[in-house]
Image (cartoon, grey):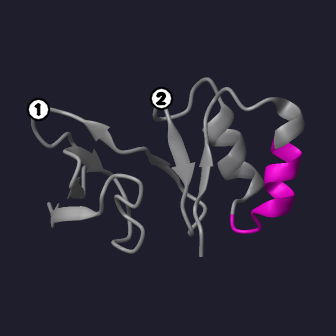
Amino acid sequence: MRSLKIRFVVPAGIVAALLVSAPTASAEAVAEALSPAAPFPSCYINRDGNCVEEPRPAPAPPPGATYLCNDGTYSFSEHRAGACSHHGGVAKAL
């Protein structure tokens, strides 16, 4: 199953298309990801419908990081499957 990536700059008209094309993303999760008060600057909706912070670089593992990706970014993925998929794969679990 694919994860759905959502960024805050998504025009409102596209949100409806995302909801139709991604049955695993709840309306609440999409609204949370698009909200100015979203918990992260950029997140994706995982297979459980949760807004998960996108992998990001840091000098040390940030709080909540679950994996170190091969490109040096830290992932906050809740599942190993697909973690770091656009970052060269998982280097190690944290």
Residue 64: tell me if it is visible: no
Q: How far apart are the two marked residues, 2 and 1, measured between alpha carbons? A: 18 Å
Please state which amino acid type lies under the numbered disc 2: Pro
**Contact (Cβ within 8 Å) of mark 2 with mark 1:** no
Dot 1: element:
loop
How busy is the neighbourhood of tag 2: few (under 14 within 10 Å), some, or many (20 plus)?
Answer: few
Q: Is residue 15 left or right of residue 51?
A: right
Please state which amino acid type lies under the numbered disc 1: Pro
Q: Quadrant of the C terminus?
A: bottom left
> In which quadrant of the rendered view does residue 60 lie?
top left
Name the residue: 51% across, 42% down.
Answer: 43
The residue at which mark 2 appears reads as: 41
How busy is the neighbourhood of tag 1: few (under 14 within 10 Å), some, or many (20 plus)?
Answer: few
Q: Is residue 85 left or right of residue 5?
A: left
**Residue 92: percent from left, percent from top:** 14, 64
* Magenta span main SS: helix
Q: Quadrant of the N terminus?
A: bottom right
Magenta stretch, residue numbers: 15-24
- Labelled disc at residue 16: none
